[in-house]
Image (tube, rainbow, N blue to C red):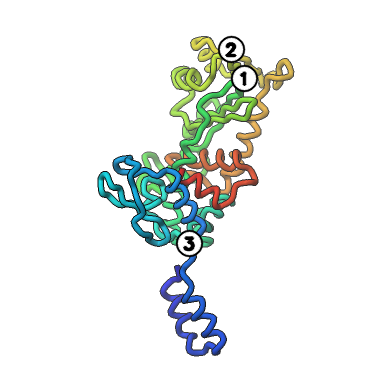
Amino acid sequence: MMESKAFQSWFSQVASLTVKQRAQVRQALNQPPRTSLAVEVVNQRASEVLACPHCHSGHIHGWGKEAGLQRYRCTSCHKTFNAATGTPLARLKRSDAWLVYAQAMVNGLSVRKAAQEAGVHRTTAFRWRHRMLALPASENDTELSNIVEADETYFLESFKGKRKLPRPARHRGGKARKRGLSAEQRPVLVAQDRQGKHYDAVLPKVDKQTLGSLLSQLLTPESVLCTDGAGVYRAVTKAEAIPHESLNLAQGTRVKQRVFHLQHVNAYDSRLKQWMRRFNGVATRYLPNYLGWRRLLERAGKDIGPEAWIRHAVG
């Protein structure tokens, strides 16, 4: 969609067009507008679901189109809806810019740079970002088997974007504890098995109750948990009867029996931290969305493109 000022600037030059140029403009205007690939993806998803999002009835039929999105009417509840209804993209405008913005997400651009690429305001780009991350944030493997590596990584607590802080503003770094960890660090548990299944989540704290409740549901009976020498893992695995191999990293023990190590989760932690630096700090409330973002990029690898991103965004 062309901005009003840009249109006025372009329209003021119409009088200076040659006969050939006028014919080209007339031909372009007479052609029906092409539906964007992003809208086609959303329409395709709706045709596969074929159910009313209001009453879940399968008795629906076409009801025209609006901005390229297919509309439907339910013959049971008589409500109308479009292909994006019930998805995170519902009620979002500027569908012509969704694909460009999705490419910006694939490239991991900041909000401002993504807004420039898509030609939208930065607040719109911010809203689109977290709408498109709603489903990827919930896509976590829920069962890990075989040898399962687990470790925590930490992110500094941030209230980025809030007008009022629950603590005095800091100029750099965080408040340190006596044992070396920051009192304002938020733990993220990263776990991965040897088949490539992956789980990560922000934890309220790292203690026996939190880890015990999580790991007992995440691991299969045949799983062997491999961690560092932290005492909390020994307490959890003893209480939950989980087979456990502990590595005393302080004494240089990084591999046991040639198969027990933390190389996969440590490598993932490193890639995650390096990728997150581009955002210059992430608000803690949105941290789960960024974890989902990174998981999606890792799983898809180089194969993911803007169309695939839209498919993941709408489910």
Residue at 54% over, 30% down: 199
- Mark 2 closeness class: few <14, some 14–19, many ≥20 residues within 10 Å: some
Q: Secondary structure at mark 3?
A: loop
Q: Is residue 252 above or below residue 160?
A: above
Residue type beneath disc 1 = Asn
Q: Earlier in the sequence, mark 3 or mark 1?
A: 3
- Mark 3 closeness class: few <14, some 14–19, many ≥20 residues within 10 Å: few
Q: CA distance from mark 2 to mark 3?
A: 55 Å
Q: Nearer the viewer, mark 2 or mark 3?
A: 3
The numbered dot on residue 146 is: 1
Q: Is residue 262 above or below residue 238?
A: below
Residue at 43% over, 48% down: 47
Residue type beneath disc 2 = Pro
Q: Label 3 belongs to which residue?
A: 35
Tags 2 and 3 in contact by the CB under 8 Å rule? no
Q: Nearer the viewer, mark 1 or mark 2?
A: 1
- Mark 1 closeness class: few <14, some 14–19, many ≥20 residues within 10 Å: some
How far across and how far down the image is residue 301, in percent?
63, 43
Q: Earlier in the sequence, mark 2 or mark 3?
A: 3
Q: CA distance from mark 3 to mark 1?
A: 47 Å
Residue type beneath disc 3 = Thr
27 left or right of 71? right
Q: Secondary structure at mark 1?
A: loop
Q: Nearer the viewer, residue 24 or 283?
A: 24
Residue at 51% over, 15% down: 236
